[in-house]
Image (tube, grey):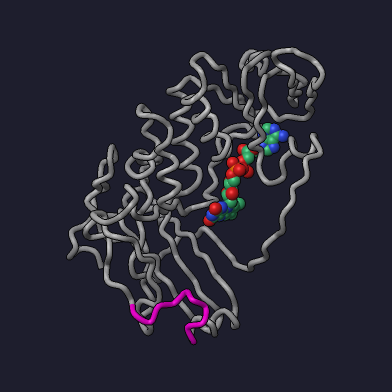
Amino acid sequence: MSISDKIPDVADIVVVGAGPVGLYLAAQLHEYSPKGTSIVIVDRSTGPSTLSKAIAVHARSLETLAFLGPQSTVARDMVMTPVNGDKGVIFGGPMLGDAASGPIASIAFPPADTAQSPYPFALVRVQSHTERILIADLERRGVRIAWDSGVTGLHVDEGSDATHPVTATLNNQHGIKCRYLVACDGGKSTVRSLLNIPFPGHTRSDMFWMADVRIRTRDGRTTTWGADPTSRVARPPTMSSSHGVILVFPLQTTATTNDAPLHRIVALGGDEQAAQWRDGTSGAVQDRVDKDTYIDKHTGAAAGVAPPTLAASSAVQ
Ligand SMILES: Cc1cc2nc3c(=O)[nH]c(=O)nc-3n(C[C@H](O)[C@H](O)[C@H](O)COP(=O)(O)OP(=O)(O)OC[C@H]3O[C@@H](n4cnc5c(N)ncnc54)[C@H](O)[C@@H]3O)c2cc1C
């Protein structure tokens, strides 16, 4: 099928970019626009990303993903629905330290019965899962994504009273006219550049390293580091040394891969940062490690959101 078979010549709204922002925005536009509004997403990639990229989905993001109307299951799917067998893990509470230090930090979340959020936790889930879940939602709505369709040119007919004043030219020279075009094409936005829209602000410089690695023990065993036996709750192992801090997040479980499970390793800071951790001036270390605040009590009292099946308190170490 050629691109021109897939892409209409005219649409009410064209969303440029099928990253998390474009996918979410298109779903919201579909939910809250007048019935019959036509929405098309165009993306220059040949298909959905399989990259892990951002892995932490916080409570506010989950709350926001729930704003897609009563029929949408996106927020629930983020917590409950496997993609390639994995559902992600929930984390919070004391972070595991190394054998010498014990837990060295704590991420405190309120217990479900006092939390002001239906999602009183953070979720470790790779970005490609979030995108897959949003794409499934868009498919249910009938919103089309045209892959391999990069915007290369834009023309805005400012003076005209035409109902569809914006024309986007795609990489195959196909043109699509629309009433509104929304740029969700990432930090190096082509649309912003084509329209000479400045990007004010400043760049914050932080140095850290990250890698997705498969971890095996020396004797060849595979293990999910930091996840409890249910593979739903994780305490990311956290190690501090004079070289800085290393956090390890499980991205897969032993149950879902024939290979050693993937983990994201993030290394922060250097000697200066490590010194701040040691003397307590970084603000990131607590002298007292909080006891579990939510994990064991989390009953999933969220409206419309089924609880994750969490381990009994004795099983969560
Ligand atoms: C290794 C890595 C780790 C990261 N970790 C984190 C993290 O822990 N936390 C966090 O918050 N963020 C993290 N990020 C950043 C996060 O991935 C981005 O903030 C997020 O993807 C931005 O979403 P977006 O939809 O705005 O843009 P993008 O995800 O960049 O999506 C833009 C889309 O637009 C498409 N596009 C671009 N140009 C055109 C064009 N001309 N025409 C049509 N389509 C076009 C692209 O193909 C792409 O699909 C990480 C990123 C990387 C690479």
Residue 238 visible to the viewer: yes
Residue projecting furthest to the bottom: 279
**If the image is split into quadrants, where does the N terminus sit?**
top right
In terms of secondary structure, what is the magenta stretch mainly? loop
Taking the image as shown, residue 41 lies to the left or right of residue 78, namely: right
On screen, residue 103 above or below 65: below
On screen, residue 15 above or below 282: above
The percent coordinates of residue 275 (x first, y second) are 54, 85
Q: Is residue 298 in the magenta section?
A: no
Taking the image as shown, residue 85 lies to the left or right of residue 213, namely: left
Q: Within the image, what quadrant is residue 202 found in?
A: bottom right
The percent coordinates of residue 179 (x first, y second) are 67, 19
| Residue drawn 78% across the image and 27% down it | 154
Magenta part of the chain: 279-288
The percent coordinates of residue 271 (x first, y second) are 59, 82
Camera-side residue of 132 and 223 = 132
| Residue drawn 42% across the image and 36% down it | 67
| Residue drawn 68% across the image and 19% down it | 178
The percent coordinates of residue 300 (x first, y second) are 25, 48
**If the image is split into quadrants, where does the C terminus sit?**
bottom left
On screen, residue 307 above or below 71: below
Task: Tell me which image quadrant ligand 1 sits in.
Answer: top right
| Residue drawn 50% across the image and 60% down it | 213
Taking the image as shown, residue 145 lies to the left or right of residue 235, namely: right
Q: Within the image, what quadrant is residue 76 found in?
A: top left
